[in-house]
C-alpha cells in the first residue's frame, strides 16, 4: 500500500470536548428535537488519545507503523507468511481487520496462510492457535477471546519461534518484546468519552442512563466503559449511571430487556459494540419504548438506524481497515528483526446522523451500503465524502 498510515488516518484529527449537554430527551432523527442535529461530530471527541496500553504506556504515533524503503525491500525479499486468528468473524469490524491485513501483506509480497474464527470461545480459539502453529507462519496476528484464559495458548507462539502481533488486547502475562512484538487498537477510552458526551445531550438534569456492559475481562470494552464513566463523572455528575452486564453477546437482548424492566426510569443507554446495541434496540421495541442509544464500533445495522433517525444517536467508530494495515506492517517489521512500539492506538472516527456518509467512507474506504444512502435522502447525513 503506497499511502502512509499517517495519511490514511489524517481525517481522524480531533478537537477539544464540547460544552456540557443540553436537556432534550427526544429521540427524533433529523428533526428539531434531536440536540445533535447541528453538532459537528468531531467537537465531541477528546483532544488527544486518552487510552493507555496494557502496561500503562502512552500510544505511539500512528506514523510509527509506516515502513521505510529499506524495510519494504527486505520484507518483499523475505516472502513473508502470516496467520490471522480472530475472536469472531461475524461482525464487520473483524472482516475489515482481515481485509486490511490481507491487502497489506499481499502488497508486501507475502501471503496470509489462514484465517481462523475463535467464535467467542476459548476452546475454539486455542484450537485455532494450535492449528496455526502447525502451519509455521512467520507471524500470527490475533485478538484474544479472553485476556486471561487464552494466555497459555498465546505463550506457545513465541515458543514456536513465531512473531505475534496483538489486536486490541494483550493476553495477560505475556512480555514485550520477547513474547509479542506490538499491539494495535483504537482509542477505545476516547470513543467511550465521545459516546458519553453525545448521550448526555439527551439527558435532563438529574436524569438516569444505563450501560449494558460486557461482563468479561476484555481490555478494550473496559476501556470504553472507563471513558464513558469518566466523562460523565467529570462533566455530568448529576446523571445517575446504572450498569447491567451480559456474558453472551447473542443473548444481550434478553439481558437488556431484564435491565430495562427493572429500571424503567432509564432515559438513555450506552453499550460497547454493535451486537449488544442491536440487542438493546430489540428489547426496547419489545417493550414499546424508544430511548437514545450511543455505542462504540460501527456496522451497517446500527449505521442504518442512525441514518434513519432511529434510537442510535452517535457511534464512536474504530478504524479496522487502517489498523489491519498497521498490524500487517508491525508483523512484517518484526519478521525481519525490526522493532515496533508496544502500543499503538488510532484516534476514533465520530458518527452522528449529519456525517454518516463521510464517516462511513473514512472507516470502510468505500461508499455506504445503498440502504444507508437511501435513508439519507434530503441531505440529512451530509456529503458522501
Image (tube, rainbow, N blue to C red):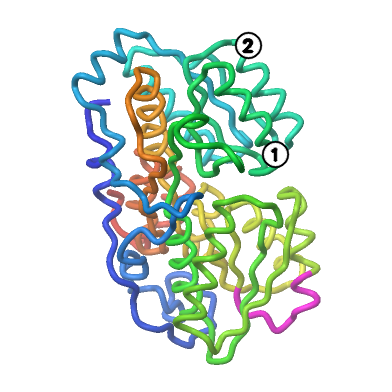
The image quadrant that residue 72 belongs to is: top left
Does 381 sit above or below residue 11? below
Q: Nearer the viewer, mark 1 or mark 2?
A: 2
- For image coordinates 41% across by 57% down, the residue present is 376
Q: Main secondary structure of the magenta part?
A: loop
Q: Secondary structure at mark 2?
A: helix
Residue with the most extreme bottom position: 205
Q: Is residue 319 magenta?
A: no
Q: Dot 1: few (<14), some (14–19), or many (≥20) neighbours within 10 Å?
A: some
Q: How many marks?
A: 2
The image quadrant that residue 342 belongs to is: top left
Q: Is residue 258 left or right of residue 325?
A: right
- For image coordinates 53% across by 40% down, the residue present is 92
Q: Is residue 123 left or right of residue 237?
A: right
Q: Is residue 365 left or right of residue 94?
A: left
Task: Name the one closer to the observer, 18 or 237.
Answer: 237
Q: Is residue 266 magenta?
A: yes
Q: Is residue 210 left or right of residue 191?
A: right
Does 320 sit above or below residue 30? above
- For image coordinates 59% across by 87% down, the residue present is 207
Give the residue at mark 1.
Answer: 120
Give the residue at mark 2.
Answer: 134
Q: Secondary structure at mark 1?
A: loop
What is the span of residues highlighted in magenta in the rendered image? 259-268
Amino acid at each position: 500500500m503506497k499511502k502512509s498510515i499517517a495519511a490514511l488516518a489524517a481525517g481522524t484529527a480531533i478537537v477539544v470536548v464540547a460544552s456540557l449537554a443540553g436537556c432534550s430527551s427526544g429521540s427524533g432523527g433529523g428533526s428539531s428535537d434531536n440536540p445533535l442535529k447541528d453538532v459537528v461530530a468531531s467537537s465531541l471527541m477528546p483532544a488527544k488519545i486518552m487510552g493507555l496500553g496494557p502496561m500503562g504506556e502512552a500510544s505511539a504515533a500512528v506514523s510509527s507503523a509506516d515502513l521505510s524503503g529499506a524495510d519494504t525491500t527486505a520484507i518483499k525479499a523475505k516472502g513473508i507468511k502470516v496467520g490471522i486468528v480472530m475472536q469472531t468473524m461475524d461482525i464487520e469490524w473483524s472482516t475489515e481487520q482481515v481485509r486490511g491485513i490481507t491487502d497489506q501483506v499481499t502488497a508486501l509480497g507475502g501471503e496470509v496462510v489462514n484465517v481462523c474464527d475463535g467464535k467467542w470461545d476459548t476452546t475454539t480459539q486455542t484450537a485455532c492457535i494450535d492449528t496455526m502453529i502447525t502451519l509455521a507462519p512467520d507471524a500470527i496476528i490475533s485478538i484474544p477471546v479472553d485476556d486471561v484464559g487464552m494466555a497459555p495458548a498465546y505463550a506457545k507462539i513465541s515458543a514456536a519461534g513465531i512473531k505475534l502481533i496483538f489486536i486490541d488486547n494483550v493476553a495477560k502475562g505475556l512480555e514485550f518484546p520477547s513474547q509479542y512484538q506490538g499491539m494495535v487498537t483504537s482509542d477505545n477510552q476516547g470513543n467511550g468519552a465521545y459516546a458519553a458526551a453525545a448521550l448526555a445531550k439527551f439527558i435532563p438534569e438529574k436524569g438516569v442512563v444505563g450501560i449494558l456492559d460486557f461482563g468479561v475481562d476484555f481490555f478494550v470494552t473496559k476501556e470504553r466503559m472507563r471513558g464513558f464513566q469518566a466523562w460523565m463523572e467529570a462533566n455530568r455528575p448529576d446523571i445517575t449511571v446504572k450498569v447491567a452486564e451480559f456474558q453472551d453477546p447473542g443473548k444481550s437482548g434478553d439481558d437488556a430487556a431484564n435491565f430495562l424492566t427493572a429500571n424503567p426510569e432509564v432515559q438513555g443507554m450506552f453499550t460497547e459494540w454493535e451486537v449488544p446495541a442491536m440487542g438493546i434496540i430489540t428489547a426496547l421495541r419489545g417493550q414499546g419504548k424508544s430511548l437514545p442509544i450511543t455505542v462504540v464500533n460501527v456496522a451497517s445495522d446500527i449505521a442504518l438506524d442512525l441514518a434513519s433517525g432511529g434510537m442510535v444517536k452517535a457511534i464512536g467508530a474504530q478504524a479496522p481497515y487502517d489498523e489491519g494495515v498497521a498490524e500487517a506492517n508491525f508483523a512484517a517489521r518484526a519478521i525481519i528483526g525490526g522493532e515496533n512500539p508496544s502500543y499503538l492506538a488510532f484516534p476514533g472516527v465520530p458518527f452522528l446522523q449529519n456525517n454518516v456518509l463521510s464517516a462511513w467512507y473514512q472507516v470502510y474506504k468505500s461508499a455506504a451500503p445503498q440502504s444507508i444512502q437511501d435513508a439519507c435522502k434530503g441531505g440529512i447525513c451530509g456529503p458522501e465524502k
